[in-house]
Image: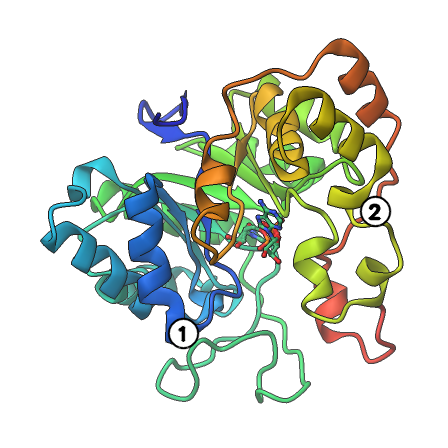
Amino acid sequence: MAPPSIKLNSGYDMPQVGFGLWKVDNATCADTVYNAVKAGYRLFDGACDYGNEKECGVGIARAIRDGLVKREELFIVSKLWQTFHEKDKVEPICRRQLADWQVEYFDLFLIHFPVALEYVDPATRYPPGWFYDGQGEVRWSKATNQETWGAMESLVDAGLARSIGVSNYEAQGLYDMLKYARIRPATLQIELHPYLQQNNLVRLAKAEGIAVTAYSSFGPTGFIELDMDRAKNVTPLMQHEAIAAMAAKHSKTPAQILLRWATQRGLAVIPKTSRPGVMEQNLESTDFDLDQADLDRIAKMDLNLRFNQPTNYFSSDKLW
Ligand code: NAD
């Protein structure tokens, strides 16, 4: 069964459950994407920074060639990396990313983080990552978020992106951009799980007609593989006794409980797994409802605990 979809303010429909592509390694990425299409996924959440867009494109092209899916049935999401925030850098890099994916347009293109870094020529290093020298030097760019958003709007005008949005914005950034946006952001993609529930930000986005996509729905699990202390030092959500009890009660897996908690709130989710079987399990997580007691119990689990923090990536004092 196809997951429900969310109507975006751009008029397009976005599948509510998609497939996340961060940390999908290059060697297996094309097959993983192909298998995910086969499992029924239609939304793929990629990014320049994930370093696997070419392989994603190979998997998608093979799935289309084999007749598993048509381009127009897919919803391909990618993101603008911070070193390309200056207005003359946005379209060229978007065109390169489209070529990597072997598609003519993105269904959704997001500003990955509202933090501009100095330009690094893709011929020097691609993806460029956080560090100007590829080692540890952070160099800021003077590009403002307003300048970058104007260039994102031009991508829509040029037919390169059907919808545009933002990621990792907080309330202040959203309020600010709503003053100058000619095209309002269609989505806001943020870290969101029971340990970081973000209720005020979700309320704000909803009030402004911006759809919210929750990433890292399993909380610490996706960050333990990065050897992050703050993820290792907290109970994994899938093993939390409250989540485990709900899974038993509903005859679902803990992962499905976590995903349903988000989709029942009207959010989209983009779980990542390379394991066939588990892929299907995550996709098939919208056919039941948590009850009020479950929702009340999860509401008590909020720790305001964020794992994906830019400072974690370039701090020398090893915040994680
Ligand atoms: P996630 O929350 O999807 O967790 C991934 C981990 O959970 C993996 O270790 C996987 O093996 C495991 N897992 C997945 N399904 C499972 C299941 N059913 N049972 C048991 N274990 C399971 O982690 P994530 O990768 O951090 O986030 C998902 C996606 O969100 C990313 O791939 C990416 O597309 C997006 N994302 C975006 C940003 C951003 O800055 N915009 C940041 C992080 C992630």
Instruction: Give the spatial CA distance, label 2 vs label 1.
Output: 30 Å
Relative image position of residue 211 (x, y in whole percent): 51, 28
| Residue under pointer 2 | 305
Left or right: where 228 falls relative to 286: right
Residue 67 percent coordinates (x, y): 11, 46
Taking 233 as reference, is 150 left or right? left
Name the residue located 19 percent from the left edge and 61 percent from the top edge.
Answer: 102
- Secondary element at image label 1: helix
As shown in the figure, which amino acid type bears the numbered disc 1? Asn
Quarter holding the C terminus? Answer: bottom right
Per the image, label 2 sits on a secondary structure element best described as: loop
Residue at point 57% right, 63% down?
116
Q: Which residue is drawn at 66% across and 26% down?
A: 261
Which colour scheme appears in the figure?
rainbow
Is the residue 216 above or below the residue 61 in the image? above
**Quick check: 305 left or right of 128?**
right
Q: Name above or below for residue 213 compared with residue 130.
A: above
The answer to whether residue 158 is visible is yes
Amino acid type, label 2: Leu
Q: Quadrant of residue 42?
A: top left
Mark in the foreground, 2 or 1: 1
Q: Depth check: give the residue in front, 217 or 211.
A: 217
Q: Which mark is residue 26?
A: 1
Label at residue 274: none
Instruction: Say if mark 2 contacts mark 1, CB within 8 Å.
Output: no
Task: Give the mark nearer the N terminus: 2 vs 1.
Answer: 1
Using the image as rendered, state which of residue 238 and residue 24 is in the foreground: 238
Give 166 or 49, whichever is nearer the viewer: 49
